[in-house]
Image (spheres, rainbow, N blue to C red):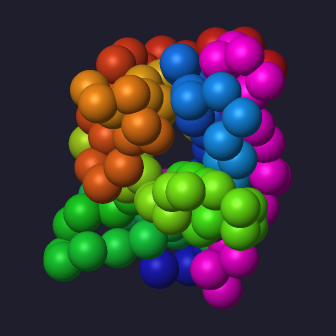
Amino acid sequence: MKRADTAEIAMRIIIDRPVPGVWHSLQSRDGTPLDLQRSGDGEPLALDFAVRVGPGPKFFGDQVRREGPSRRFVYVRVGQAAGDHASPWSRRMKIDIHDIDPALLARAAGGGIIVTTICGTAKDGSPACATVPALRRELVDR
């Protein structure tokens, strides 16, 4: 697919209720942490990135990972995985993007940011990991 056949879409992951003091980051193409952040007292964190979306929809970009023929997702690194070697946790959150409603993608291609909100704390009080479902997804103005 040619780059001209894709639309760049701004995306944001809001980590609601992250474990205080734990570092979080996006994962770059080469696996290193990007946009390192931590919450001092549990306030939400915001991680911004862009993807290119083509017909299908098909997703492309530095943060886009693939699993099988259709699953596409973004990794959020946590604790040691985010570069904090003193953390007792080394985890990754998998945030699916392949399931974004095509109508929302089409509206986002005209401007705005697709915001996906997730919960950053697991039921046991530790940082969330593995596949973390979206609590909500919406389009907001830039």
Q: Position of residue 126 (x, y in %)?
A: 42, 37
Asked if 24 appears above or below 68 in the picture, the reply is: above
Q: Is residue 1 magenta?
A: no
Q: Give left or right: position of 5 versus 39.
A: left
> Residue at point 44% right, 71% down?
65
> Residue at point 65% right, 27% down?
20
Q: Position of residue 75 (x, y in %)?
A: 49, 59
Which region is colored magenta?
Answer: 27-54
Q: Position of residue 49 (x, y in %)?
A: 70, 49
| Residue 98 in view in this figure | no
Quadrant of residue 83 within the rendered picture: bottom right
Q: Give left or right: position of 39 versus 59.
A: right
| Residue 80 in view in this figure | yes
Q: Give left or right: position of 27 versus 83.
A: left
User: Of residues 20 and 113, which is closer to you in this image?
Assistant: 20
Q: Position of residue 39 (x, y in %)?
A: 74, 28
Instruction: Please identify the dominant SS of the magenta region.
Output: strand
User: Of residues 27 and 100, which is closer to you in this image?
Assistant: 27
Q: Give left or right: position of 137 versus 81.
A: left
> Residue at point 53% right, 19% down?
16
> Residue at point 38% right, 17% down?
136
Asked if 72 appears above or below 21 in the picture, the reply is: below
